[in-house]
Structures are given as C-alpha cells and as structure tokens.
Image (cartoon, rainbow, N blue to C red):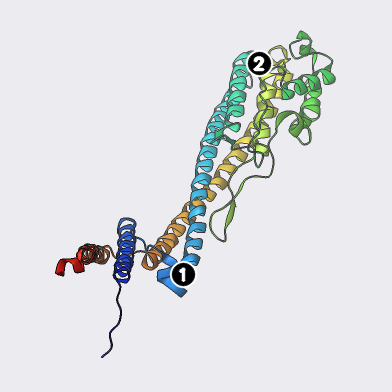
Amino acid sequence: MKTTYISTISLADASRRQIQNQSSLVQKLGVELSSGRKFDVGLDLGTRTGEAVSLRSEFNFLDGIIDTNALAASRLDVSQAAMADILSDANDFLSTLVALRENDGSSDIVKADAVGNMELLTSRLNSQLNGSFVFAGINSDVEPIANYSDPGSANKIAADLAFFTEFGITQSDPGVAAITPAAMDTYLNGAFETMFTDPAWGTSWSSASSSVMVSRISASETVNSSVSANEQAFRDLAAAYTMMSDLGNENLDPGTWKTVVDKAIEKVGSGIAGVTSQMGKLGNVQEQVSLASDRLKVQTDILNRRINDLENVNSEETAVRLNTALTQLETSYAVTARMQGLSILNYL
C-alpha cells in the first residue's frame, strides 16, 4: 500500500483554478447569450475561420456598393428634378417666342421671361446634394455656372465686351436701332456663338468638368451617374436667354428683332431636345441602379445567412449551458468553502 502526500495548499489551489475556469466559462457564455455570436469565432471555427473572413469581406464590399448606390440614386433624383424644371421653363419660353415673334413691341415681356429663365437655369445647374454640385462633373466642389445677373460676373463682362467689340456701342444705347438683320445674324453666328463654345465657355461661363461622375453599381457594372453643365443643351438655352434679355431688343429694328427671335427659337428648340435626351439617359441609369441594388440585396442576404450559420450561437442551447455553468460555479464555491473550513483542530 502506498500513500501520497496531499497538502492543504494543493487542495486550495485546485479549487481556485476550478473557480477561475468556471468563472471564465460563465463570462464567455454570458457574452454569447447577449450578443448572439460566438465569443471567439477563430477558436470555435478553427480551419473554417478563413471561410468566415472571406464571407464577411465579400458582404462588406457588396454592402458598401449598396450604400453608394443610394447616394447615386439621390444624385440622379436631384438631377432629374432640376432638368424637369429647366425643361418646363424652356417649353413655356418657346411658346412665348413663337406667339410674340411678329410683335416687336412685346420685347419687354420676352426680356422679363428670359431674365427669369436664365436665373432658374443658373440656379438649377448649381444644385447641390450633401455639399456637392451635381452638375459640376468631377469638379463637384466648385459651383459650375457663373451668375449672369451679377454685373461683375465673367460671363456678363464677356457678353458686354463681345457686343461692344462687334457694334461699337452698348446694349442699352439707342443706336442699336441701326443694327441691320444681316449684321445681327453675323454677330449671333460669330462672336456671340463663340461665347458658348470651348474654350470661351469654360473661361467665362462654366467651372464644371465635362468628365461626369462614374459610379460602381455592382461588382462588375459602372455607370455615368451625373450630367455636366457643359452639355450642349444647357449652352443653347443659356445662349437663347442671353440674346433675348441682353441684346438691346427693346430698341431693335423690327426686322432685326425677328432675326434674334428666330435664332432664339432655334436655340431653345435644340436645348429642349438635348435636355429631354439627357433626362432619358439618366432615367435608364436610374433603372440600372435600382435593379443592381435589388440584386445586391439578395446576394448580401444570402451571405449574411451563411455568416450567421458560422458565427452565431443557438440562444436556447447557450442559455441552458449558462445556467448549468452557474450552478457548477455555485457548487464550486460551496465545496471550496467547506474545504477551507476543514482543520485537524476540529478533531483533537
């Protein structure tokens, strides 16, 4: 028969380790029950940890695209609303021009409409979303269109200089009555037209970039998600509103007035067609973004379910295990207390 020496300190240390291990288990199960996720995913999954990491990476990538799609959709909505306002005003202005073409005495009415339409065109092309200018292309931090109603604005100064250079008088000079239809036609198709083509347009009218915003709407798709203020449609409308508001039309000869009106009708018609085309293109992009987001949501739902299968815990099972661990911990405390109360002095 062999006896083994057992010390009081070894018994106490064993009890201490048992309580520490049990306390650690209770803490782990408590965290799992409250979070619904494994306490240590890597330890529990082992070799399957790589699968969980890969799934989470793909989920985060696709979820990020869904978020950017929402921003792109907002930008498209703002752009569509702005162009709808521009188109509505242009259609009304075209009707006014056609109706009043033969009445040179109506120049004040046309001028007032042109001034208002120019202000609306400028306002809508300078629309912002979350601090970014939606019609500025990739120069989204810069206001795209200069304010023509400001006498110190570059486009107003350029228009005044072009008129004075061509005719030697200002637009408000009564001498504009001497401008012939042929001279006005030459001006409108020459120096005036030049102001709305590059590089003059970019120098005095627009700070926008012709390179528009490109958005990734899925893992394999990208779309142009904005319209630049440099589109020809907006240039044509700006030209029409300028010629009907700031060529001294109230003093023009009736024949010269008709020349200006005919050119404005041509520009407005071209602008309407261009704006309509841009709205159609953006409508197609909106549909693409919506469909892509729907597909991505299906993909992320599938990935999320797979991640949950790997990382989440069974709440009912975890609750049972936690209750069992608490009971065992309480038992360990009780046994330890009893053992610490043992003393040979009690038996002497």
Label 1 sits on residue: 49
Q: Position of residue 9 (x, y in %)?
A: 32, 68
Q: Position of residue 146 (x, y in %)?
A: 68, 27
Tag 1 near tag 2, CB within 8 Å: no
Residue closest to the eye, 225 or 201: 225
Q: Position of residue 223 (x, y in %)?
A: 59, 52
Q: CA distance from mark 1 to mark 2?
A: 81 Å
Which residue: 51% across, 44% down?
71
Q: Residue 31 occupies which quadrant of the picture?
A: bottom left
- Asked whether, in this view, residue 13 is left or right of residue 259, the answer is left
Label 2 sits on residue: 104
Q: Which mark is residue 318?
A: none
Determine the secondary structure under disc 1. Answer: helix
Q: How many labels, in total?
A: 2
In the displayed orientation, state which residue is furthest to the front.
348
Which residue: 66% across, 24% down?
147
The quarter of the picture where the C terminus appears is: bottom left
Which residue: 55% across, 42% down?
279
